[in-house]
């Protein structure tokens, strides 16, 4: 209940993010060309594609004015609980199953190996996602488990991933539930 006690403040922050991120106004990782020639066969995807057209999370905020709520207000706690429930169960885009894509995003590490090597992480669309509460919706988180550990990658580094997308849910506890996983063929640091 601790994270729900600050609901009104969190709602003030996430309502503008939901409106801007999910409707194409704000995509913090620029979608610029950055592919190596040997991976030219991978289609460049955009984060918006991961959200089915039929899903409208902004409806959760109809009739809510966070400026009228205070922390600890039962209405704020109920609204925040509903947002978290909806985001954990966010639907995925069924058409993306098995597609070979490249996608830019940020690294939210799950498990560091020896010497700072990284084998498991979440790929997220904006800086700070999964580190703050609440995490993004499940359809905006991709779970990645590498066969060979990555070196030289830090938390929240911007990267390109090249691989095959799968519709697979994974729960990473406080880091969030992911609606997708990816069999990664290549990772490279993002270059503008």
Image: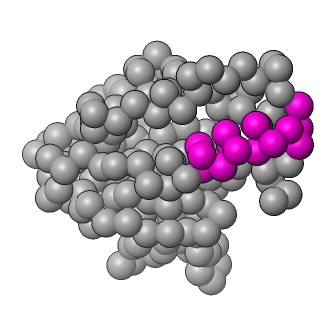
Q: Residue 82: give x, y in percent of width and height.
A: 60, 46
Residue 142 visible? The answer is yes
Taking the magenta stretch, the answer to whether it contains residue 145 is no
Residue lying farthest to the left in this orientation: 41
Q: In the depicted view, which residue is nearer to us: 12 or 75? A: 75
Magenta segment's dominant SS is helix
In this rendering, the count of numbered labels is 0
Name the residue located 56 percent from the left edge and 59 percent from the top edge: 176
Residue 184 lies left or right of residue 7; in this view the side is left
Residue 154 visible? The answer is no
Name the residue located 83 percent from the left edge and 27 percent from the top edge: 69
Q: Quadrant of residue 73?
A: top right
Quadrant where the image shows the N terminus: bottom right
Q: Residue 100: give x, y in percent of width and height.
A: 16, 52
Residue 112 lies left or right of residue 133; in this view the side is left
Q: In the depicted view, which residue is nearer to us: 93 or 78? A: 78
Residue 101 lies left or right of residue 135; in this view the side is left
Name the residue located 40 percent from the left edge and 41 percent from the top edge: 104
Q: Residue 44: give x, y in percent of width and height.
A: 23, 37
Q: Which residues are magenta?
A: 70-84
Which of the colour schemes (rainbow, by chain, secondary structure, one colour) is used? one colour
Quadrant where the image shows the C terminus: top left
Residue lying farthest to the bottom in this orientation: 114
Q: Quadrant of residue 97?
A: bottom left
Q: Residue 103: give x, y in percent of width and height.
A: 33, 43
Query: Is residue 44 depicted above or below 23 in this figure?
Result: below
Name the residue located 67 percent from the left edge and 39 percent from the top edge: 79
Taking the magenta stretch, the answer to whether it contains residue 79 is yes
């Amino acid at each position: 209940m601790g994270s729900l006690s600050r609901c009104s403040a969190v709602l003030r922050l996430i309502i503008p993010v939901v409106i801007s991120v999910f409707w194409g106004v704000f995509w913090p990782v620029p979608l610029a060309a950055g592919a190596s020639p040997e991976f030219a066969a991978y289609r460049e995807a955009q984060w918006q594609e991961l959200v089915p057209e039929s899903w409208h999370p902004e409806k959760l905020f109809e009739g809510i004015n966070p400026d009228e709520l205070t922390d600890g207000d039962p209405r704020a706690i109920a609204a925040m609980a509903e947002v978290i429930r909806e985001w954990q169960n966010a639907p995925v885009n069924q058409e993306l199953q098995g597609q070979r894509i490249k996608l830019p995003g940020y690294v939210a590490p799950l498990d560091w190996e020896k010497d700072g090597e990284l084998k498991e992480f979440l790929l997220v669309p904006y800086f700070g996602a999964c580190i703050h509460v609440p995490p993004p919706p499940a359809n905006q988180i991709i779970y990645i488990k590498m066969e060979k550990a990555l070196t030289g990658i830090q938390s929240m580094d911007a990267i390109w991933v090249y691989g095959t997308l799968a519709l697979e849910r994974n729960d990473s506890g406080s880091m969030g539930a992911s609606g997708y996983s990816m069999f990664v063929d290549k990772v490279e640091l993002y270059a503008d």
